[in-house]
Structures are given as structure tokens and as C-alpha cells.
Image (cartoon, rainbow, N blue to C red):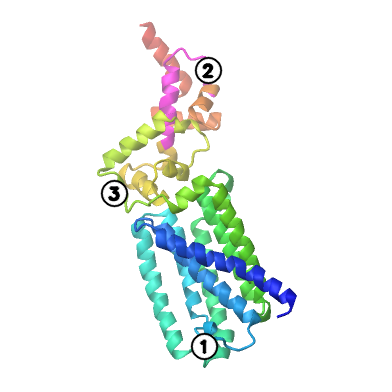
Amino acid sequence: MHYIDQLLFFFGAIGVFNSFIIGGYYLLTAKRENLPKIIFSLFLLVFSLRVAKSLLYSFSTVEPIFILQSGPAFFLLIGPLFYAYVISVQEARDGAIRAIRLHGLVWMCVIAFLLVVFPFSHYVATNKEIILPLINLQLLVYIMASLWRIRSVIFDFRRTTVLNKWLVLLSTNLLLLWAVFAFTTFRFFVVGSIIYSTLFYGCFFLLLNNRKLRFDLFQRAVPQDLTSTFTRGGELEEALITRITQHRLFADPDLKLPDLAEQMDLSLHDLSRFLNDDLKVNYPDFINSFRVEEAKRLLETDSVFTVEALGNHAGFRSKSAFYRAFRKCTGTTPARYQARGAKSDGG
């Protein structure tokens, strides 16, 4: 190879090589209960394989060389693995396992069919011109499905949790890489390899510099369901009340459901299900009930706050939101509630 080709090959290969190492290391060290780490490791390994094969194809003088003879069939696992990873981060372990079994079984059957009926060594043109574009389309569908699952996070990116920001980052990076490999010719696949190396090291150094993200991704185990953490719904309700009141979480007007789920070390799906199904309340009403109780406490004391400032202190973003929530919980306005309390104290 020319020295420029050697340089391009080096920059394309270095990220692929290290992602293989990282993916293998995470897979070998992952605890059984840490499903997100296991799925992420498998995704990283399979996607690294695609990038490596694309890189070798760009510089191969023999067609096909040994490592390329399996063809692109295994690329069908990239999309399902990424989608399962998003589910494993957002939901309980059982939901992620169901997704892996369903999607994995279907696509493993498709892969086996392609390897038997259309082996790459005998159907090179078919694999290049028909099967690979269909695989790219399948990956795009899974990327869009993943983005759809985290759509609320995208529109509230600044106030969402660091774990959700990581999912957005991975999804956009994967979409960029999909575009590169889908729209460049085989001869220029090295461009995709270099971009992959750049994105890989960017994400790697982000993990190195963000201890909390590293812990959430690779050390925290996801509960199998609510009963694995709290034996009864009453215990979870008690734990929620204790955490919210002792740490005054309600006083933060930007506190979202994902933030509270992270505080409780629960998946967003589990906490939302508990509030809706067990407590029969939506999240805004649930958190506002604590704010109203704080406001009532201050109204019943000789508080120096004005009514509007009191609402802000209790965690309401605006005066109208405070009045609306207070009337919904008590049936009256803050001023009337305060006056009624003063009248009863006066005898």
C-alpha cells in the first residue's frame, strides 16, 4: 500500500481494534444482572466487526478475502442489539430480555437463511447490490425506533438525566455512521472507519471524564422488577415519600420523572407504572402534592414569604401553576387557606 493508504488504514483500524478490546473486556467482566452492559458489549463487538470488514474490503486486493467470506448477514444483529440496549436502559430487565428473545430469534433465523441460501462466496453481487441495502434499511428502522423511544428526552435535552443524554449521543452517532456506510461506495468505506474511530474515542474519553455516567452504564444493576427492590408497593411509596421530603426534591421546579427514577435507582418504566397503576396518579399531580403540603405548612406559620414567593419556594415555576395545583388539592386558594387558618387560631 502507498504510505497515504497506510496512514488511512491505521486511523481507520485503531478505533476498530480498541473497540474490539473494550467490547470484549466489558462482556467478560459484566455481571449477569447488569444486562445493559452485556447488550452494549455485544452491540459494540458486532458493530466493530462491520467496520473492520468494511475497512478490509477497502484495501483488499483479493475478492473475497477469508474474513469477508461470511458476507454482511451478521450485520442484521446491529439494529436489534442497539434497540435492546435502549430498552434495557429505560425499562426493567424483563422487558429487555423479552425484546432480545423476540428480535434476536427472528433475525438469527434470517441470518441462517442468508448464509445457507446466499453464501457470499457464491453470490457476491447479490450480497452487495440487494442484501446489503436491505440490511442498511433494517438498521435505519431500528435507529428510528430507538429515537422514537427517547423522543421526549430529545425535546427536553438540557434537563434530562446524563444516562438519557448518553442514549441520544449514541443514537445520533449511529445514525451518522449509518449514513456514511449507506451512501458511500465500497471503495471509500475507509471514510466510515475513520469516522467510527473518531466517534469511538470521543465517547470513550467522555466515559473516562464522567464518573457518574460510567457508573450508571457499567456498574449499576437494573432491577428485574419493582418487587426485587421493594417487597410491597407500600414500601416503595414510603421510600419515595422519604426521599422526596428529606432531600426536598419537590423544591426543584425542573424535577422530571426520569430524574426521580434515577434518584430512586429505578427504571423510568417501572416508576411510571407504579405511579399510574398502583397509586392511580400521574407524575405532575404526585410531585405537586408535596409542593402543596410545603406551601400549606408555610401558610400555617408566621411565614415572611408573600404568597407568590411561597409558591416559588415550594417548587412551583409560576404563580398560576401554584394556584391551580393548590386549589386542586385543597379546594380553595392559598390566601383563603391562610385566612381561614388565622381565623381559627384567633378563636
Disc number lying in front (3 or 1): 1
150 lies above or below 253: below
Q: Nearer the viewer, residue 282 or 37?
A: 37
Magenta stretch holds residue 294:
yes
Residue 36 at what x, y percent from top left? 42, 58
Return the disc, 3 or 1, that comes first in the chain's sequence: 1
Residue that mark 1 sits on:
120
Residue 265 at what x, y percent from top left? 39, 44
Taking the spot 74% from the left edge, 79% from the top edge, the residue there is 2
**How far is the residue under mark 2 from the one under mark 3?**
43 Å
| Horizontal arrangement in the rendering, residue 38 relative to residue 181 (left or right) | left
User: Mark on residue 99?
Assistant: none
Residue 324 at what x, y percent from top left? 48, 32
Residue that mark 3 sits on:
228
Residue that mark 2 sits on:
305
Within 10 angstroms of label 3, few (less than 14), some, or many (20 or more) residues? few
**How far is the residue under mark 3 from the one under mark 1?**
47 Å
Q: Nearer the viewer, residue 304 or 120?
A: 120
Query: For the residue marked with disc 2, what is the amino acid?
Result: Phe
Viewer can see residue 290: yes
Disc number lying in front (2 or 3): 3
Q: Which residues are magenta?
A: 287-308
Residue 187 at what x, y percent from top left? 67, 80
**How far is the residue under mark 2 from the one under mark 1?**
75 Å
